[in-house]
Structure formats: structure tokens, C-alpha cells
Amino acid sequence: MNLTGAVVSLTIAGWLIWLFPAPHLAAVLRIGPVDGVMTITSCYGATDAQGNPDGTDCSGTYTPRTAGEPSHRITLDEAARSHEPGSTLEVRTARGRAHEFSGDALGTWVTVTGLILGPFLALALSFRACARDGTWSHDADYVAVLIAAQLAALALGFLVGIPVSIATALLG
């Protein structure tokens, strides 16, 4: 029964990742065809809910590749750099927002993925240990695993985002 709990836990984690960060992560990583072209009207320093700096966002007009779909306003989340008004970019979209390859965006979505996976991974490991030992007591060992998984997700976001930001700035 406990092994089933581990499988169910990881299945739920996979489903939540597929549902929330996966479309954005795929768009940032350039997986799949280009969805359309965005003509930039302005770029600005974005802020999060607490007012802290959150990279550069750009707004503009999005023209889908698919014939017959109308152009509309869209926001380019966490742009790699501030783009000049009038410039055009090939973008991929997810959940109504445009994405390009950037260190900020990659770091954000890798972190979100890890933060979702961490608790479910710790729970699955706990269930697996219960199945192996035949007992429910683990002296809160897996709380430490949970904390370590969350910290690892944050560290991985930085370790992925910073080099990509540097490479994007140097290589254009």
C-alpha cells in the first residue's frame, strides 16, 4: 500500500508540473514551433507583487503564424534584454503570454518546477521507506528531505538562470 502512495505522489507531482510550469518552460526552452511574431511597442522594468524588481517585460502586438487568427496585444515575460520599439521577435506562447529564451525566465520556471516536485518527492520517499520497513515512523527525517528539496530547487534556478543570462548578454 505504501509503495502505491509513492507512485500516486509522483503521479500527482507530474500532473501538477504538466499543468502549471511545463507549458511556460517548453516555450522558454524553444520546444516546438514558433507560435508567431511579436512587434515590440515598449519594454519596462517589471516588478513582482511586493514591488521588487522582476526583470524586463515588453509589450507589443502579437501576430500568430496561423492564418485567419487576429493580431492582439501581448506581454513578453522576462525578456532576455530590453528590445527597441518596432523590433520584431519570433516568440512562443503559453497561457496568453509570450516567451523568449532568457536566463530570468528559465530560472523562474525551473525553480517553480522544483518547488512543485520537492514536497511530492519527499512524500514519495517517505512512502517508499514505509513500504520497505513496514512502519510509519521515520523521526521526521523526510521533513529534512523536504527542506533540502526546496532549497535545491531555489539553488538550481539560480545555477541555471545566471549562466544563461550571462551567455545571452555576451552572445546576443
Image (tube, helix red, strand yellow):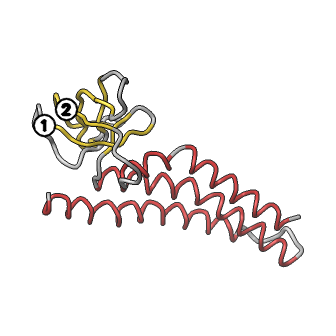
| Residue 85 drawn at (x, y percent) | 11, 32
Look at label 2 and name its amino acid. Answer: Thr
Disc 1 on helix, strand or loop? Answer: loop
Mark 2 neighbour class, 10 Å CA radius: few under 14, some 14 to 19, many 20 or more: many
Q: Quadrant of the N terminus?
A: bottom right
- Residue contact at pointers 1 and 2, CB within 8 angstroms: yes
| Residue 53 drawn at (x, y percent) | 26, 42
Cα–Cα span, label 1 and label 2: 6 Å
Mark 1 neighbour class, 10 Å CA radius: few under 14, some 14 to 19, many 20 or more: few
Disc 2 on helix, strand or loop? Answer: strand
The residue drawn where x is 35% and y is 28% is: 67
Residue 162 or residue 35, whichever sits in front:
35
Residue 85 or residue 109, whichever sits in front:
85
The residue drawn where x is 24% and y is 34% is: 38
| Residue 87 drawn at (x, y percent) | 13, 37
Give the answer, above or below, for where 125 lies relative to 59: below
Residue on which disc 1 sits: 87
The residue drawn where x is 62% and y is 68% is: 144
- Of marks 1 and 2, which one's residue comes earlier in the chain? 2
| Residue 45 drawn at (x, y percent) | 21, 37
Look at label 1 and name its amino acid. Answer: Ser
Q: Say which quarter of the image contains residue 62.
A: top left
- Quick check: 54 left or right of 84? right
- Quick check: 134 left or right of 113? right
Residue 135 or residue 21, whichever sits in front:
21
Number of numbered discs overlaid on the protein picture: 2
Q: Quadrant of the C terminus?
A: bottom left
Furthest residue toward front: 67
Q: Say which quarter of the image contains residue 42.
A: top left
Residue on which disc 2 sits: 39
Furthest residue toward bottom: 133
